[in-house]
Amino acid sequence: MKFPGIPQVAYKGGDTFSFQWYNPDEVILGKPMKEHLKFALAWWHTLCAEGSDMFGGGTVDKSFGADKSDVIAHAKAKVDAGFEIMQKLSIGYFCFHDADLVEEAPTLAESNKRLDEVTDYIKQKMDETGIKCLWGTCNAFSHKRFMAGAGTSPSADIFAYAAAKIKKAVELTVKLGGTGYVFWGGREGYETLLNTDVKFEQENLARLIRMTVEYARSIGFKGDFYIEPKPKEPSKHQYDVDVATACNFLRAHGLLGDVKMNVEANHATLAGHTFRHELRTAAVNGVFGSIDANQGDLLLGWDTDQFPSDVTDATFCMLEVLSAGGFTNGGLNFDAKTRRMSHTPEDIFHGFITGMDTYALGLRNAAKIIADGRLAQFTEQRYASYKSGIGADILSGKAGLKELEAYSMQKEPQIPDSGRQEMLEGIFNRLIFS
Amino acid sequence: MKFPGIPQVAYKGGDTFSFQWYNPDEVILGKPMKEHLKFALAWWHTLCAEGSDMFGGGTVDKSFGADKSDVIAHAKAKVDAGFEIMQKLSIGYFCFHDADLVEEAPTLAESNKRLDEVTDYIKQKMDETGIKCLWGTCNAFSHKRFMAGAGTSPSADIFAYAAAKIKKAVELTVKLGGTGYVFWGGREGYETLLNTDVKFEQENLARLIRMTVEYARSIGFKGDFYIEPKPKEPSKHQYDVDVATACNFLRAHGLLGDVKMNVEANHATLAGHTFRHELRTAAVNGVFGSIDANQGDLLLGWDTDQFPSDVTDATFCMLEVLSAGGFTNGGLNFDAKTRRMSHTPEDIFHGFITGMDTYALGLRNAAKIIADGRLAQFTEQRYASYKSGIGADILSGKAGLKELEAYSMQKEPQIPDSGRQEMLEGIFNRLIFS
Amino acid sequence: MKFPGIPQVAYKGGDTFSFQWYNPDEVILGKPMKEHLKFALAWWHTLCAEGSDMFGGGTVDKSFGADKSDVIAHAKAKVDAGFEIMQKLSIGYFCFHDADLVEEAPTLAESNKRLDEVTDYIKQKMDETGIKCLWGTCNAFSHKRFMAGAGTSPSADIFAYAAAKIKKAVELTVKLGGTGYVFWGGREGYETLLNTDVKFEQENLARLIRMTVEYARSIGFKGDFYIEPKPKEPSKHQYDVDVATACNFLRAHGLLGDVKMNVEANHATLAGHTFRHELRTAAVNGVFGSIDANQGDLLLGWDTDQFPSDVTDATFCMLEVLSAGGFTNGGLNFDAKTRRMSHTPEDIFHGFITGMDTYALGLRNAAKIIADGRLAQFTEQRYASYKSGIGADILSGKAGLKELEAYSMQKEPQIPDSGRQEMLEGIFNRLIFS
Amino acid sequence: MKFPGIPQVAYKGGDTFSFQWYNPDEVILGKPMKEHLKFALAWWHTLCAEGSDMFGGGTVDKSFGADKSDVIAHAKAKVDAGFEIMQKLSIGYFCFHDADLVEEAPTLAESNKRLDEVTDYIKQKMDETGIKCLWGTCNAFSHKRFMAGAGTSPSADIFAYAAAKIKKAVELTVKLGGTGYVFWGGREGYETLLNTDVKFEQENLARLIRMTVEYARSIGFKGDFYIEPKPKEPSKHQYDVDVATACNFLRAHGLLGDVKMNVEANHATLAGHTFRHELRTAAVNGVFGSIDANQGDLLLGWDTDQFPSDVTDATFCMLEVLSAGGFTNGGLNFDAKTRRMSHTPEDIFHGFITGMDTYALGLRNAAKIIADGRLAQFTEQRYASYKSGIGADILSGKAGLKELEAYSMQKEPQIPDSGRQEMLEGIFNRLIFS
């Protein structure tokens, strides 16, 4: 036991080591909460990140009792800690980058060997606990060789190396039964246009994704691929700015049918959008896939990756998830880390409890809003004029500019009905706070 | 003469009513400056806008000597003023919205009659002066009937009315020989997702564009259509956020071959991008069309539409224009207004002189950079590893993940060569300041 | 009756024309809610603003049944409408600019006569209803004469004119028994440093404030003066950026004892701060005064002045108000307007109901948090090390650098205790959502 | 020699290892360029920073040929490298944090011993080369003990430890003859108001500054103290947001006469201001001191610390420096680092050459603008109405509200003269580009 002092976190226990709103097996809208929410732990933040920032070193000890110089022992201690955390919190899934599982070795072959050993151990834990892999991915941005990108590197050797790492990450994802594989282009972008051929780099990025899709399908991967949009940081400009930009890229390169989106809340706001907007855009483009749940600070210009505590945002998110039919292969991964000053093991648990409760309450609120029906009805009614007459002719294609001019010559239009934003905001508040 | 005190603005006259860098007939890279730059006057800012803002009324008199209650006389006075400005400044083109030309009448039929009369007068002036129409467009955002959008209005009658107005605007564009027609979706977006069906609204917007393309081609329009991206303002969210988002929309609705981009500098920065980035994105997607030149304030969150004075930005812009092969149907429209405190006719001329000189110097700089060659060579050389060996195999499709893993097992990659950003920035400065 | 179809808005009526949380006479923490909250209506947004924005004209009719060409009749119709709205919503206060009350006349003398007539009528209504004036102010930013500032105008004549207008506004405030007078420097700043003498302008601004304080006291004004900080818009830079900047200005010119702050929520976020931060800064500097309650959109760069619906923000605000001892002369003015698409009289009521309920719930939440005590206790406990030993020596001045070095040579410090942010966020959510 | 391949960088050498505009001994406005500019190297970025960011490790080797496990040898290698860089670039000054000079030891006593040894070596190099120390400072933000602040730490022991470190840093500054001592409050702020007592923390911060001033003066320090404002990063909120906020803090605690400002370009823009604005604000408040020259990216929300290449900004900066009378104890420190992809020693030199040339050209431009005189004359003339008549009465205090009302009753004011922003921008461009 890595956290002997921390109890199993139960629903409605009352104290801060209990859930107030997350009751995994409670059925809401015909499905247990745990199936609606499909919470996942992010290996990197929870088991690796030690609290360093650009102005200071680590504040948290993530050795979990192991001697960190013994990389395999440390990697296994992280597995033990991770599974204990997931079990104590009733988290059913995890997500990982290759580099999170075990420190990379000097050679690719040796790194892969280490990964094999650690994933054997993880697989055994999975069998024991029933915990599953939501998705895997490859870290092709931290090592200095990727300073100028992986798929978009100006060096063909580095493209090749990234491809080799991705191959292994896909294989590990399949081995662990992951239902998703994510591309996050942390260095796929540019620092300055003074030295960058954008067209060439984007074509290479498309090549790398296409290769990965083909290889993964060839070894039996049945899950989803996801791009995770982010506009900037670490690069000045990253090619996958937001959902619409990533969709344009996928469409331009014939990849739209192959790749969906892993939408991150904090990346949405860095791109100047609400999280809800990005989820809706994914749905409109048919690429809703999975979610990285966290929370940024709209007054700060970088990814803060806070554990979510904004219930309004979580409610909007769950409304979109429910309206998109719920998760299939995707889920809700906490791409979140405790604050640098929250440096104890207890804080990890508090972070998850606050985050899971926030989304559990978001789900309960969304269900209440759907049951109430007023918000959806208002929206539907607003477009009623397209159901008949000239509106129907517009939709069917019967009316073109000439017909619409003739119509308008006869009938000066009224102004539209009030949008009733203040009333709708009031109804929303009454539903979530009562 | 509306501006009797203001002289013809000549090259190298020395005082502030002369050009320092713009010499219309001087040949640069095989073409006269005026053909490279294709400057245009925007009817709205120059002839209509009177300096009001959200906290105060107009500061500038734009009656141009006419009695404003006589709408036709005032409209014609604006024509006279506009052509005098263009002639004194050697501006060869203008751009317009229907509503800029003459105040709208209570009925569509009457408005159209007014537009016919005023455009007859404009046409006559065009014949006399050789000045041309760069593009026309329709104002479907100012009147309160468009408060909830035009093509995306929840009211079918308003969609119809917008279509009727667009029909006329297209006809006027053809009548005046315009080589472009622009869509700016000033209210095509949303204020709140609490009452908005994004998918339906975007489909309707696509319908309206499709109808317009079909009708315009049917009456002989041979020019280009453009979307003008902008992320926000006046709407909280506008559907045409930036070039990539607009391209995604066009691709999704089968319109990519029909519509290009009119890229505005200030809208680029509101979307979180550099102007150069947006121009490059247009080129990469094959939709580079025309430019709205102005300048925002990156510390302010709204469209300030200043006359451009940033020579670095203008240089980057002209590098992209030259690299895209120069303007064909498009040009460089000054979507710019004098500051609210610059309330005299002289200020209009100062604004244009500063703006035109800024772009003229930008063109001269771009030509110098191209002639120098170092920046382009550095970029090309950076990707040299793709010309042979494993790089060539990546491009040709010969190498997939398996081959690249095998290659990487043999060869640990070096880190990429230095990006030399500081050196390139220094070279750039030496070229533009020497 | 201007709004015959709209009922008296009552507590817990159930439908959208009732309060869910605002119960004026309910006692919370020893005081009726209406005394804690001191809600005020802003004459300008509610009775004057017609929904225009930079890209379009008005959408709302604010004639209130009067013929707008009869300025006095229209002004009185606004009074009638305003008092009906306040009575139906149980709003006890109003705030005004001179120019809101009645359209300005061509001369100062005539304008003042109009103001006398309209304020006579208002006074009579006040006597009938018991409704009070929270504060008055002078609009010295809308007219084109103020394009370059009022107190900071480069023209001495305009400084003089602003002073004359302020004199009258102060007199009207006294006449109506207002307990506050506000300075909002909407044009007190600059557009460009190329033509601005910042030092001179700031000294003049201080002169104008000093004159106003002296005159107001001389005619018996006993209330508070407030600066209302805002960083930008309409000016590129406004001198009263935020609370700390305004305090620095007041201290530099010996005015700190005379002037407090009217803190606006939306201006706080435009300055890059949370609303709570600005309130706390006011308290730390001893200048907490009054509040302009509204809500901005952190993804937009301008003042949206929305009716508040964010309960978390309202809770934080009321925590600060309670901790500062509550309002004395100040109150909570809704500097908020309905959205441009919310164009009916019903929307005005919905806006206020949502806003008032949001703050009423904020007050209830704040009271719950105070009663619970955990958040305050945690904070207090965090600084416990200063109560004795070396901490006490630091506070008392007994320990200087030498003593602290000697102490530290003996005792290598521990890292500080966890800040427990995630736990505290969880506790906060449990308190406000349960 | 650490950089044998890199030549002495000379003026007008022609290639990229020469200066285009920096000619140290050339006299401009009566003073050699080197005395106007007082360039300094920042120990941390140039000799310590290895290119890591939040998403990846180092890319640059800063061992300078030493075995990094021998901390003293490595520290001395950095000294050698630093002096070679400064000599080859004709840089006359350096700046340092204690922690930059040599890795901290497990105990304070041992750290201090290391610092003594390394500064002995530096002093010897200074004597040999004539290079001077511009300012010193203390790193009280990187170590995890400072995670919750130094002077604002909730732990008195940590306050004490910070004080002890600052004592040593002040002593080292005196030993090396530094003419300045800087406070940068990298963790003096808060992450969340849920656990923070702002008033108490700010009072403690003032205590720490007061102790430092007293101690430094007691050991003979004759130089200037500086606060270096920054609004955020690493903390969510830092107490020294900008110059005005820092001045308010100093005034509130009686420290204004003791402490000036070290204004950083990139921090200015993070606070929402132009660099020029912050310099002007410092001058207006009488606290202009020293400069940290670098350049941010206004489209990014974090401190990018780029080497400056924006000549317009540098010109504005030098105009302010000249107008404030030039540097006395302060200078121009390059708080700048090469981009992460610029990973070779050559890039360090390119960074400095581009930065120094940018400021040298800025100085040349500023001198040209002053000689031309038009910009200053325009500004002075703009306020001419205050030189006599009612304007003079306002300044002298003869006119108060009553007199100004009487005056305005007689004379309806004109609108102010045009601000001529576009003309001034054009003049500026002609001066800097011709």
Image (cartoon, coloured by chain):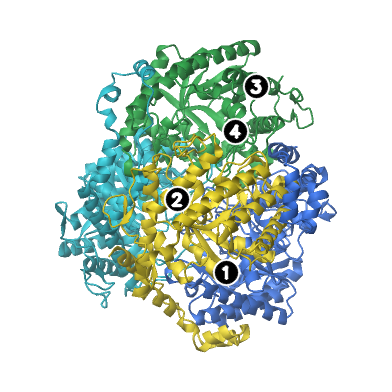
Chain colours: A blue, B yellow, C green, D cyan
Depicted A74 relative to depicted C147: above or below: below
Pick the quarter of the image with the N terminus of chain C. top right
Q: Quadrant of residue A381?
A: top right
- Same subunit, labels 3 and 2: the answer reads no
- Callout in the foreground (1, 4): 1
Assess disc 1: are there few (<14), some (14-19) or many (≥20) residues with their C-alpha within 10 Å of its C-alpha. some
Image position, residue A73 (x, y; %): 59, 72
A213 sits to left or right of A103: right
Q: Mark 2 points at which residue?
A: B83
Q: Which of marks 1 and 2 is in front?
A: 2
Residue A71: x percent and y percent?
55, 73
Residue D112 location, quadrant: bottom left
Q: Position of residue C100 (x, y in %)?
A: 54, 24
Residues at marks 3 and 2, CA–CA distance in whole angstroms: 43 Å
Pinpoint the chain carrying mark 4: C
Circle 3 sits on which residue? C66
Residue B285's disc number:
1
